[in-house]
Image (cartoon, grey):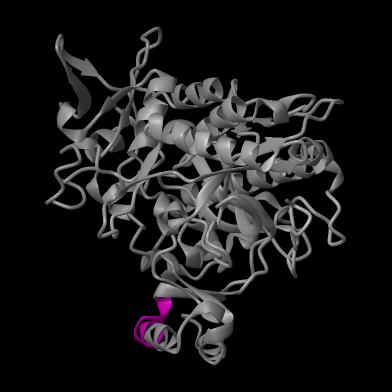
Amino acid sequence: MLKSYNTGPFFDEMFQSNGQPKKHYSRFHQILGQFSKNDLKEKHELAQKSFLKQGITFTVYADEDGTERTMPFDFIPIIIPSEDWLRIEKGMIQRTEALNQFLEDIYHHQHILNDGIIPSELIEQNPYYYPKQVAGIDIPLGNHIFLAGIDLIRDENGEYRVLEDNLRNPSGISYVYENRFVMRQVYPEVFENQSIETLEQQLSYLHETIFSHVPKTVEAGVEPCAILLTPGIYNSAYYDHVFLAQQLGLQLVEGQDLVVEDHKVYMQTIRGLKRVDIIYRRIDDDFLDPDAFRSDSILGVPGLIEAYKRGNVAILNGVGNGVADDKAIYAYVPEMIRYYLKEEPIIPNVETYLLRDPKQREWVLERLNQLVIKNVGASGGYDMLIGPHATSEEIERFRKKITENPSQYIAQPTMKISTAPAYQNERFYPCHVDLRVFVMRGRDTYVLPGGLSRVALKEGSLVVNSSQGGGGKDTWILKNEGGGANVASGS
């Protein structure tokens, strides 16, 4: 069935341009060829039913027909050789270290602004910059980024590039594990004789990383209490919250379950109040504390930020991280790496145009039909224009948006994002893919081997987000039989 597969003008993950499988896909390709049409159909259907049975869903708020959907799964894995993965690991550790130093800097001494590396107005006018709530706070390990989700793509030459940094509440780790679970259950044949990095140890690393952020106010010898704070069952990533709380042994709580007394945080239990030391929060900054942010928030905990300021509780990820994963700031991350680390970026950015600059804006406005336009604060594929696929009405609507509020948008070239085969509707066809790499930072830094490969299942689409019709793939990192590390100490 794959004989008619055509890679087209794109770099394909699995196939060379002559139609032959790449070396690291050869074993998988051989096994795939042993499946009949009925085998493939039955296994595909079994995989989808497995996701439905386990309740692996996500929420689409804008869908008029119903908000909850089963995560689409495609069984053709993304396979990455060990030497390629080692470079990705080093690049992700480098990038998150620079971003963390940037956050620590702008909430304390602001050296990078004073030295003119980044325009100060990009920080001071950024809606996700919270100096009133965060400036001057000494947080555990000086670490603002406990968990990062860095989105990578490969261009037409097969070079990895960073598409986006997610430093607030990156979601998707649960899907990494469920993709692997379903793959092993439904396609056990494909794991035979494959030397693949396992995921089992990674949850213990994540647990270790959380508990490395113990506040200084916790007495020596006292076992710290960590919880996962969720906005509740209607959140789009609620499945992710439940999975992580269960796997990490954390109590899953909502804001109404917590109370602040004497600037300390407590969880209400049937045995009375229990002191909370570490909060892995999955609530956005604006809703964390009605006393410090939005007064109308019923999701948060009054007095939480004051407890945070006084060092009585750690909040992971740090409050105010949004200023560092803003898409306008993204353009300056290579300069951050050079400034803080005195190194060249290992994984480059996608070329980015800042529309606040009149010259760049003029150039972009003349080429809207050729470029991708993104809202600097949006995520999930929303408020985005893909010029070559847009109607004239959509282009004019974005022209007006840019003209009225240029600082709110950036532009990027329409990348020839790599493709990989997908099996849907009983056939194989090429779909665009990206990779979300998860970086866990505490006393040590760990990079989850593989991450979440997302696939634009709609033919021709460049949008991989599940809320926009995308799905997931298992990601295999082939083992380096000579050994390799995915940990950096002292980050």
In the image, residue 361 lies in the stretch drawn in magenta: no
Looking at the picture, tell me which residue is in the foreground, 159 or 315. Answer: 159
Left/right placement of residue 275 relative to residue 193 reads left
What secondary structure do most residues of the magenta stretch adopt? helix
Q: Position of residue 438 (x, y in %)?
A: 56, 40
Looking at the picture, tell me which residue is in the foreground, 420 or 417. Answer: 420
Where the C terminus falls, by quadrant? top right
In the image, residue 401 lies in the stretch drawn in magenta: yes
Left/right placement of residue 366 relative to residue 467 reads right
Q: How many marks?
A: 0
Q: Is residue 48 above or below residue 355?
A: above
Q: Residue at x 39, y 17 (%)?
A: 249
Q: Position of residue 312 (x, y in %)?
A: 29, 27
Q: Is residue 317 above or below residue 181?
A: below
Q: Residue at x 49, y 32 (%)?
A: 141
Q: Residue at x 59, y 40 (%)?
A: 451
Q: Quadrant of residue 388?
A: bottom right
Chain part drawn in magenta: 400-407
Q: Is residue 429 above or below residue 243?
A: below
